[in-house]
Image (tube, rainbow, N blue to C red):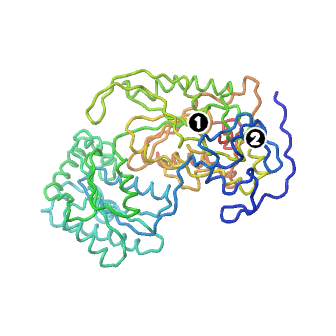
Amino acid sequence: MSEPPQPPVPLPASPTRIGGHYPGASSPNVPSRPLSLSPLGPPAEEIKKPATTTGGFQVHNPSPHILHEGNNAQPLDIIGATATDKLVIVMVGLPATGKTHTSKRIQRFLEFFHDIPCSIYNVGEYRRKICGVRMPASFYDNSNEDGKRQRAEACEVALGDLVEYMQKPGVRVGILDATNSTFERRDYVKKVIRDKKLGVKIMCIESICNDEELLAENIRTVKLNTPDYKDQDPKLAMADFQQRRENYKKFYEGVGDRDGPHVIIHDCKKFVINRIRGYLPLKVVHFVMNLHTLPRTFFFTRHGQSEYNTLGKIGGDSGLSKSGTEYARRLGKWAKERVCVIDGKEVPARLWTSTLRRTKETAQFIEHPTIEAKFDDGFQHDWIQMRPMARRNLDELYAGSCDGMTYKEIEDVYPEEFKARQSDKPLAHEMERTREPIMIIGHQGILRILYAYFMGLKREDAPYVSIPLNHVLKLTPHAYGCKEERTCLLSKKEMTADGQDEPITSMPVAASMKRVSSKNRIDKLIQEQEKEEGGTLGASPSWGPDDPVMNAPSC
């Protein structure tokens, strides 16, 4: 049995923070900025000591998290202030080329990571409300005057709503998601916007898909599940949709120089960028160049239980406990069978960890054979399966003066910093770009943000998402959302059966979450989504959101 922790030494009230700084903070152990923004703490020569003193409080920290770049290094990219310009994106492309997927990813990225208000106006949704669903392919033939008139009406209503939205104070980005298949149509859209003197920038994004296999996959997985074709015979629905595309092709005009600023995406492989200027347009272009519409899967897991987990401490760079090592062993077998194999066929897969010891040790039993793999670019070459990649931007937030402390100790010493522990840690571009399945062995704080981003949760809900120990979360994003599966590889009963103590403390739970747990809230969202998509959800665990073992501190 471990010795019980000594109660904290009583301290005077923590210093008042003004504008993110503590006036008169001369001690290296007193943060001069919020912990959520910058790695702070005592000098390197002091932090290497097993015990440090924080404002008179003795911290026993035998395995500190050391920043080798120096005391003032910032391990995470911090998103600075953005400009106040507004942007309208006009999507262009034949049906099933990924326009809606691209629109939704842009919106999600800007709103979640940059806090930039963004709204999508999908003309297809307006058309279904005005004209009804399941319109035959002949409805989209330009020689069908009645169909042409009704489609134009839907475009007008959508454009009117977009203009009204862009007139509101504080909004930043509006996206017109439609085929916009002729230069005349696109020119009209721009004229309407400019006549309103909104002072917005306008850019076109054209999506072209000439890859027949990719096109067929887009139609099968996305379009046939829309209200236009839901519950119809798949063969008949496929034939009708292909005829719809052919009707659009008859009068389709691609984007060119006369369209002004634009991006042309060819099969998510080749990009043509023309006259793009400004903060927001360039931010969008950079993100779009990382997108693709191929099916992909992410596997999230926290590191196995660490030595600091058993003590309730945050931060540090400790190794795995006995239970943590057992989880690592089981994870290695599970990854070989479930991550690296799809439909009975071995596929190339990736493995990302943080640079900290506990995530690397969790990956120690994952095998790395060399396989021959063929990729979507047509090339075939040897691939080292699940080759470990340690990434600094997956590291847990450097805890600074709080390194090695428990949440209770942080609350006693730095009550104003207690909530600042949760912060945004974006890692989106690389994940959007990658085609292969990725297993990420990380830390609860990072995984919460990535989970919330792909699952469509609000930013304010992210710090309270439950990412329990010993679980693998499988996320499969698609054009209209993301499916989730959770698998427990080591139960709480198995962890505590060896007589080890439960952790001293656990993650804090928001007051609102004590009434309705984050797990239940997430389950409700997933169940609502699955009600529409016909998915399945695993059985709920027997532990709660504040369980001291499964929801051990974020470290």
The x and y percentages for residue 101 are: 36, 51
Query: Which kind of residue does numbered mark 1 sit on?
Result: Arg
Q: Which of 522 and 194 is in front in this view?
A: 194
Query: Which kind of residue does numbered mark 2 sit on?
Result: Thr
Q: Which residue is drawn at 86% across and 47% down?
A: 9
Picture quarter with the C terminus: top right
| Residue 156 lies in quadrant | bottom left
Q: Residue at x 45, y 35 (%)?
A: 438
User: 10 Å neighbourhood of mark 1: few (<14), some, or many (≥20)?
Assistant: many
Q: In the visual, does 516 lie left or right of 163?
A: right
Q: Tell me, for residue 505, which label it has, or none.
A: 2
Residue 538 visible in the snapshot: no
- The mark nearer the N terminus, 1 or 2, is 1
Residue 531 visible in the snapshot: yes
Q: Disc 2 on helix, strand or loop? A: loop
Q: Tell me, for residue 302, which label it has, or none.
A: 1
